[in-house]
Amino acid sequence: MTQELIGRWTAETNERAYLEFSENGSLRGSDGANNLVTSWSIEPEGFMIKSSLMTLKAAPGMVTWVPKARRVEPVGDHLRVFDAAGNHLGDLHRQPPGTAHKLGGR
């Protein structure tokens, strides 16, 4: 069940905005300017993300809802992202395995 979640998911508008889930429960991500490091787990409600602290830098093209993610649902090559209240924030797209992350988002 977790294999559908493991890997890197990026925003369509800015691939520097992402969530990357590891098998060991660690999670790295960014809104395009600020990095986050936290963990995820499988709970009765689904795949849950623990809150984390981040810097508050600003940059063009930031995807500000990414750090608000508290629950996610993988659906094929899309990752539906929800906040703590269950509001749908947006979708990320699976980055194919072996695809190198390009600095600068382009």
Image (cartoon, helix red, strand yellow):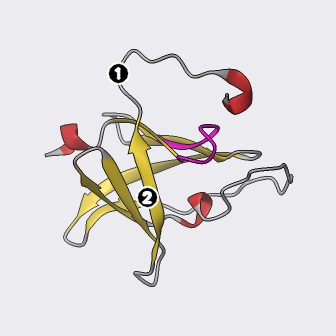
Q: Which corner quadrant holds the C terminus?
A: top right
* Secondary structure found at label 2: strand
Residue 48 lies left or right of residue 99; in this view the side is: left
Residue 44 on image: x %, y %? 19, 70
Q: Which residue is rendered at x = 35% and y = 21% of the image?
A: 97
Location of residue 94 in the rendering, given as x and y in whole percent from the top left corner: 37, 39
Who is closer to the viewer here, 33 or 102? 102
> Residue 91's mark?
2
Mark 2 vs 1, N-terminal side: 2
Indicate the amino acid at tag 2. Asp
Which residue is disc 1 drawn over? Answer: 97
Question: 42 left or right of 68?
Answer: left
State the image quarter where residue 6 is shown: top left
Q: On screen, 45 above or below 73?
A: below
Q: Position of residue 2 (x, y in %)?
A: 20, 43
Instruction: Give the quadrant of residue 65.
Output: bottom right
What secondary structure characterizes most of the magenta part?
A: loop
Q: Which residues are magenta?
A: 12-19
